[in-house]
Amino acid sequence: MCGPGTECHFTQLGFGGESARRFTIPSLNWKWQPTSYLLYRYLIAIYQTVWCVLVIVEWGTEPHYSLVDTKWKWLIYISNWSYLLLTVHFIFAAVAVTVYYTCGGCNDDPHSKDPTIEMSERGEGSSHVNTQGDATMPWYLKMMWFLQVTSYSAAVAVTILYWILEYEPDTDSIHAYGVHVHGINVLLVVIDSLIVANPYRLLHMIYPALYALVYFIFTAIYWAAGGLNPVGNPWIYKGSLDWENEPGLSAVIAALTVVVGAPVLHFLFWLLFKIREAVLSRCCGSSQFV
């Protein structure tokens, strides 16, 4: 059931076995490739970077935010971790695609097949690991893949949790900065996931889960070291992540997020990938895929 080439085989935990070109052109063939795809990568990276800088500059100042004791505490919140991570992903993706084409693309392995032919032979959406393709998969594309997998799930998770658990209509104002951290981020993720041809592997759910685990460990250490929130309280998220007053509840929430929440979100992205590939294969033919 979990032999080589299946979704549950341990080799699927890695970031190899795919043609590098799949990560450097869109899911559908565009005219003027790779120029148009590079332009897209630059535009989304610049947009996200500009707003990330604006959010950091504005955070902790009135009237959009409450006053804080120090701006560096922006980094104690998972929403801000995830917004910064998404920014890093978009920047890194733009740089990685640029480096790939600057260095000659697939020419670094003269024996590698064209990915269009390769996928036609093994079927689009197959989880078969192409060991020859791994030779054309440089480290920076693997890192881009890891950042994508982690930042996508994180962006959706913090947005859902913010509007359900944290947002208070009576006291919290809705403004462009907050909406970008808890809304536009998801819109950009959806757009990016529909455009890029990067594959999704089911077992990669471990990486969003590890990201969540690292954050919860950080919060516990931060609290144990005497860390306070920006207004001097011992909790980061009152009622949901408060190691001082509700350690049991905080531990349960952390465990459920790591074991259930993060894997489920990744599964939904994997399912979206499978549906997208099936639809494109049906309406456009496998030759449309990279």
Image (cartoon, rainbow, N blue to C red):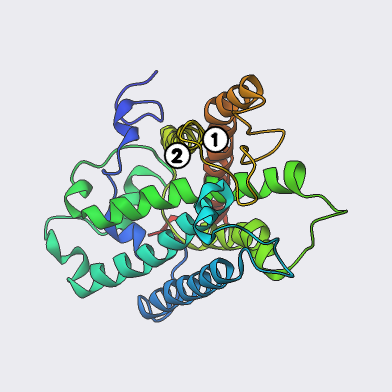
Q: Is residue 137 visible?
A: no
Asked if residue 160 is positioned above or below residue 257 in the image, the reply reads below
Q: Nearer the viewer, residue 196 or 58?
A: 58
Q: Is residue 167 visible?
A: yes
What is the number of the mark on residue 191? none
Kind of residue indicated by mark 1: Ala
For the C terminus, which image quadrant?
bottom left
Mark 2 is surrounded, within 10 Å at the Cα level, by few (under 14), some (14 to 19) or many (20 or more) other residues, namely some
Q: Nearer the viewer, residue 168 or 91?
A: 168
Provide the residue designation for mark 2. 211
Q: Is residue 36 left or right of residue 269?
A: left
SS class of the residue under badge 1?
helix
Residue at horizontal 45 percent and vertical 47 percent from the top: 149
Between discs 1 and 2, the one toward the N terminus: 2
Provide the residue designation for mark 1. 262
Kind of residue indicated by mark 2: Tyr
Q: Are marks 1 and 2 in contact (CB under 8 Å)?
A: yes
Quarter-of-image position of residue 174: bottom right
User: Alpha-carbon distance for marks 1 and 2?
Assistant: 9 Å
Asked if residue 115 is positioned above or below residue 176 in the image, the reply reads above
Q: Is residue 141 left or right of residue 57?
A: left
Q: Position of residue 88 (x, y in %)?
A: 41, 61
Q: Nearer the viewer, residue 278 or 137?
A: 137
Q: Position of residue 16 (x, y in %)?
A: 26, 44
Q: Position of residue 62 (x, y in %)?
A: 71, 69
Mark 1 is surrounded, within 10 Å at the Cα level, by few (under 14), some (14 to 19) or many (20 or more) other residues, namely many
SS class of the residue under badge 2?
helix
